[in-house]
Amino acid sequence: MNASCHSASPLQIEHLTKCFRQGEAVIEALRNVSLTIRRGEFVVVMGASGSGKSTLLHVMAGLTRPDGGKVAVDGEDLAAMADSDLTRFRRRRIGLVFQAFNLIPTLTARDNVLLPLLADGRGDSAEGRLNDLLDRLDLRKRAAHRPDALSGGEQQRVAIARALIAQPSIVLADEPTGSLDSVTGQGICRLLQEMCREQQRTIVVVTHEPAVAVWGQRIVVLKDGRVLTEFPTAQFADVHALAAHYQDIVSAP
Amino acid sequence: MNVACKLTLSYALRHPARMLLTSLAMIASACIVVWVVSGYDALASQFGRQAAEYLGRYDFFIVPEDPKAPFLDMDLVASLQKDPDVAEVTPVTQQPTRVVNPNTFPDMDDGPGGPGRRISPLPLGEGPGVRAGRGQRQSGNVLSAHRPHPNSLPKGEGTGPRRGAPAGGRQGGRPPLRFFVPVSPTLVGTDAASPPYPMVKGTWIDPKHPERRGAVIGKNAAEQLDLKLGDEALVIFGPKEFQIKIAGLIEEGPSQMGMGRRMRPPGSDASRTGIEAGPASSAIYVPLALAKHFTRDQAKINLINVQLKPEAKARTAEFRKKWEVQIAKARPIASLLGVEDIKSGMEEGMMGSRVKQQAWAATGLSLLAALFIIFTTLSMGVTERVRQFAVMRAVGLTRGQVAQVIAAEGILLALIGWGGGLLAGWALLAFSASRQPGLFSAGATVGLGCILFTGLSSLGGALAGSLLPAWRSMSVQPLEVLSPHRLLRPNCFWTVFSGAVGLALIAVNPILVFVAPSSFSLDSDNIYYIYMAVGCTTMAVGFLLLTPATIVIVERLLGPVVAWILRFEPRLLRNQLGSNLWRTLGTTTALTVGLGLFVSMQIWGYSMLEPFKPGDWNPDVLVSLQRGGLPDAEIRAVQATAGIRAGRCIPLAVEQPKLASDITGSEGRQSVIQQNNVIMIGLDPEAALSGDDPLLDVKFVEGSAKEAIAKLKQGRYCIVPDHFLRATKLKLGDSFSLIPPNLSPLRAPRSGRGEGQGVRGASPIRTVKYTIIGAVKLPGWHWMTKFSGLRKREGRSAAMVFANYDDVQKDFALRQVNFFWMDVDPGYGAKHMDEAVQVARRLKDEAKAHRPTFGPPTEEDKPLDAQQAAVLLVGDALQKIAERHPGEKQPVNMQGTWTGPAIMFGESVRITTPEIIFDRITGRAGSMIWASCTLPLVTLLITSLGVVNTVMASVRARRWEFGVLRSQGVTRWGLFRMILAEGLLIGLITCVLSLGFGVFSGWCGTGISQYVSFFGGLNPPLVIPWLPLAFGFGLTLLLCLAAALYPAVATGRTEPLRLLQEGRAAL
Ligand SMILES: Nc1ncnc2c1ncn2[C@@H]1O[C@H](COP(=O)(O)OP(=O)(O)OP(=O)(O)O)[C@@H](O)[C@H]1O
Ligand SMILES: [Mg+2]
């Protein structure tokens, strides 16, 4: 990472708005969202279904452009970038994990992991890192398999490996445990947390499961496209306490 | 609404672009059928009218049926006359004859010299067939136009005289030399009171006054002969000439183009004459008594015209029933022909015609195209909707209902194709009819047959195409709702297995064609039918089975290359096509239908051309003197001509006699040709064949040059081409007999059926016998003889046979020297280049005034080479020698007078070189091959619409994937290239498959040609014409790239998020 990365906050969001137009109807998915995330922080975004969590993540990843406001990753304004720059930026700085169907069905697990590097034309430059990652995620034996031969948990581990292979500064995950059982989900969360600690990566995870949320350091709650509140997780003794607090917040009028 | 329909409609509306494209492809393929079938209908619809015209004012013809007794029982006339329904019964005699206009000095070389002309320079009326001319539409059955068979219609020439230039001669100034150019209308003796066809001018003959010698002639014949009302003409019958006076001109009945042998009712044996014995269309009518006088009472009645009373016209069916049996009982056997017989005869004649074959081919091709288009579309639909089907099954739809969805989609597309194709085809017909009014003379209509045909190809294709997808949709399990992606990856075992079975099936055809016939001695007709039924099918199925393996292999091998060319990571492309095997299979197969046929036609065409190319055995120059000829004393003068290599110029004694017996089996064959004669070439064996570098550099397959020279000198021995031995099953030491043509003009038996009219046995036919002493390879001899004048009597020949000069000269009573073979000295040409250029200029100037075309050396932009210069100088010198000996025109076949494929020096000297022939045939054949490639190319175009569809579906199915790729940092430009690469790979797979298919089927095609007599004995090698193939491949790749372009651009432009979201929804 170069100097500018360290000086700037890895993720800075200011007055973000995003609308979806469907015919006459305009859906305001995000309204004036502002958020600053520190380096190495593990942030959890929570909220009811339709509150705009995924949309926020997509905007942060540069998958779509906001209608207003500013998103800066490592100090660079995404809105100012042309598509090709944005793509390259995403390839190098952002790791993405989705809920399901994350992987390219025709590629082996190994090639799926290498995807960002392949896209960058440096597919063979990361043998060592790849093997490390596969070992860490216990995927060594499954590397030659295609996604349809992998279990959901394995698929998600592959997706995490892919998100990390290019050593991005931020990892964004949208309900990474959404289609997994709770034990596997916990494993995934632990992995994410460990990676984040070891490599000083910034992580943003979208979820509505308190069991996932406890792994984070800070929780941001969205409601109807607005940041309702945010609070650190350290204050809660266990998942149940956190779940109860979250319930109180979202069900308040 | 039915669930299936609802789902189908909603899906169709959901993907309008795909619907549009698939519909377009279906419409286009149906449109081909409409176009071709309507063209066919338009032609066939003329038959009724033509049949009626052919009958003229009569209702029935009675013709002899027994070729051995080609005349009719006169009692029939008497009993017919008694029938109260009959208004008129006219017995007619039709005899071959020659008619000349004594006042015309004909000039053969005037006019365009097209194939349609009917002037016969032969004294026999055995003239050059027009059958090989470009005016011919028939591929088979067209017999010699001028065969004076008493019973035969002048088949296959009808359009000729009308199209051809009038053969009127130049009259001014020249003395009325008796160089007759006989035209051969049929002499019709009749006592009918009124003409059979409408009169054009003058009056009908007066049967009561034969002594007035009045005659009525067909207007086209009159035009050709330049005869006018009141003119005198000569009718030549045997050695005698009779004067007649033209009293009237009459319309000619329509020619019976299609009335070949196949016209005969099914089940009849090969010798039956059938309708071929109807009235002649080109005729000269005289009173019956006069005809009898001309023919010295040899003329028997061989046609009875029957006209019914007006009130009985409605009862023709009854009349026919009443008389049919009676007429069949008559001795000799006769048959009754009405308008329906003639019409169905014409239709049958067309069955085998190219038009009909084209209609079938088009229907077949578009059926295949429709099949694959629908198959691909539906397959894609199934793959895309596996989860959807799973949900449907989960909520309680039965397998049948799921399959219905697919079937309904197929039928919907078929109906759109049918309706749209009919509309589009109709519009196309209307448009082209308005642009080119002559195109469909009877008006092109979209008839019932056409509608049915189109429906057949659309619906048939749809049903066949939806079978597999429907089956696959039925096999979707409800649980698949939970599985992320149902991948149809190639099952390694099945791919290899089907590939192996495919290879085995492909091997069947070559074995059938090349191995089986010799090891099981099948007869040639059977080989052909087995080839068509078994060989072609196994080959097609074999390639289909081989396709999955080809896809996987090509993708593995060429995928990285394509990725490298388009500069992206090859792993991103890996398995894309193989993983969606069904889709890829459908698309590549569809494309292969067009491209594969294109390739095989090109390969077959150029391979078949190879043996026609004049081989190295030819001496440099063949000289033919078409007028007069040289006395033996002048041979030395010719040999001493500057520019001819010393000792390499020999005179040839040439004749084209008929074979005394049908050893080539040409009678039984349905072939364009009757290989019933050979071209005898008498030469000095020592001068032609001896030495290290003989003038006639032939390769002996059997026997040896040394032995042959010795035997030939002994007399009555000959050398034949190797294929002649195969065709006749003769061996070295066997002999065969020939009939010298000039010696017994009318008694020479005619070819094919009908041995003259009972003259056989009147006097024994003199024959000469030659014994085979050697067999040589003579590639390209057909064409060397075609335009050079070596074919003196017939359009085609079974072989070129070499014998001793003196034998041939004596046996065939040749008095002068008319042919030379020689090698020229290019050194002389180089030295006298300026003079040669002068000669070339002169020839070109002459050609301007006098002749339309000329060989390549006069092209001013192309400088003469030394060889050409030498040829020109030698020709010029020979012209001077020839002009010292003017004389009569020599017999020659029609093509032997065409000016394009040879160089004429003055009126007489005609020079043919292998080079000119080569240029000529490659140019001609090239355009023919390309013409036959139109349909495959159009099919390729249509099926390439399917590629757009496939790539679009592939892209749509992978939108989520592309979304992921984009989210992982693949640029839109990268995505664009990836999608293009997919199209390109589809194209490449198609090219590989088509090349394989084309090579194999082309190769087997050349093999099977051995058993079809036209090509008999050619033994063509396999030639792969890379240049045209490169065009086809390039076109395919371009089409595939173009097809991928829109999906590529569209996907590249889409925002990553939308790809992700839509992709998810598409599941
Ligand atoms: N492409 C789109 N077009 C129209 N509306 C959209 C689109 N994407 C999202 N929305 C709307 O934006 C709002 C926020 O959607 P988003 O996917 O961000 O919610 P979410 O918080 O992730 O919900 P969930 O927890 O169910 O995933 C929703 O009301 C959704 O309907
Ligand atoms: Mg969401």
Image (cartoon, rainbow, N blue to C red):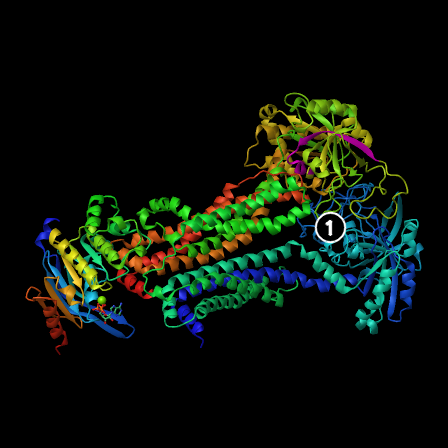
Disc 1: host chain = B
Q: Which residue shows up at 53% across the image and 65% down it?
A: B459
Asked whether residue B768 is drawn in magenta, I would say yes
Residue B626 at x, y percent in the picture: 74, 35
From the viewer's perspective, is A243 left or right of B713?
Answer: left
Please identify the quadrant where the C terminus of chain B is shown: bottom left
**Crowd rating for badge 1 (residues with CA inside 10 Å; few <14, some 14–19, many 20+):** some
Q: In which quadrant of this rendering is ligand 2 seen?
A: bottom left
From the viewer's perspective, is A122 left or right of B538?
Answer: left
Residue B346 at x, y percent in the picture: 72, 59
From the viewer's perspective, is residue A6 above or below residue B441?
Answer: above
Q: Which residue shows up at 47% across the image and 50% down it?
A: B498
Q: Which residue is mark 1?
A: B166
Residue A27 at x, y percent in the picture: 23, 72
Span of residues in magenta: B767-785
Question: Can residue A135 be spotted in the picture?
Answer: yes
Residue B478 at x, y percent in the picture: 37, 67
From the viewer's perspective, is residue B911 above or below residue B180?
Answer: above
Please identify the quadrant where the N terminus of chain B is shown: bottom left
Q: Amino acid at mark 1?
A: Pro
From the viewer's perspective, is B428 left or right of B722?
Answer: left
Asked whether residue B129 is drawn in magenta, I would say no
